[in-house]
């Protein structure tokens, strides 16, 4: 579970819990994620923009670092079922 690739593919709306295997932290993490949002850009005749219907089409967790001990590679994902 130490491979960062195992942290990828988290989809919006799915609750992900993490656990630091180094210090046991369950509550404080620095999470870096990339989100792709598709939205409807609506311009008025005067060129004023309003952005509507934003929809997250993908979200990727780049890295998770434990806030307590700074351990990045010891963080594992806790499966939803537990
Ligand atoms: Zn930790």
Image (cartoon, helix red, strand yellow):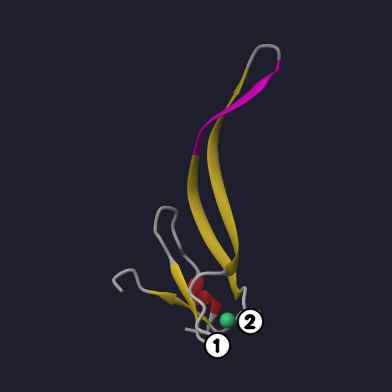
The image quadrant of residue 30 is: bottom right
Residue 39 x %, y %: 54, 35
**Sequence order check, earlier mark of 1 and 2:** 1
Mark carried by residue 22 = 1
- The answer to which of 75 and 6 lies nearer the viewer is 75
Mark 2 residue CB less than 8 A from any atom of ligand 1: yes
* Residues packed near mark 1 inside 10 Å, few (<14), some (14 to 19) or many (20 plus): some
Q: Who's the residue at 63% across and 81% down the image? A: 69
Establish if 23 lies above or below 32: below
Against 8, residue 55 (above or below) is above
Q: Is mark 1 within 8 Å of ligand 1?
A: yes
Q: Which mark is residue 69?
A: 2
Question: What residue do we see at 55% from left, 84% from top?
Answer: 74
Q: Residues within 10 Å of mark 2 (few under 14, many from 20)?
A: some
Q: Is residue 65 magenta?
A: no
Magenta segment boundaries in residue numbering: 47-54
Q: Position of residue 43 (x, y in %)?
A: 63, 20
Mark 1 near mark 2, Cβ–Cβ under 8 Å?
Answer: yes
């Amino acid at each position: 579970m130490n491979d960062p690739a195992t942290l990828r593919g988290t989809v919006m709306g799915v609750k992900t819990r993490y656990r630091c295997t180094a210090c046991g932290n369950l509550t404080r993490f620095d999470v870096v994620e990339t989100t792709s949002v598709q939205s409807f850009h609506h311009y008025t005749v005067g060129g004023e923009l309003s952005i509507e219907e934003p929809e997250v089409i993908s979200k990727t967790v780049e890295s998770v670092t434990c806030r307590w001990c700074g351990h990045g590679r010891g963080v594992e994902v806790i499966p939803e079922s537990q």
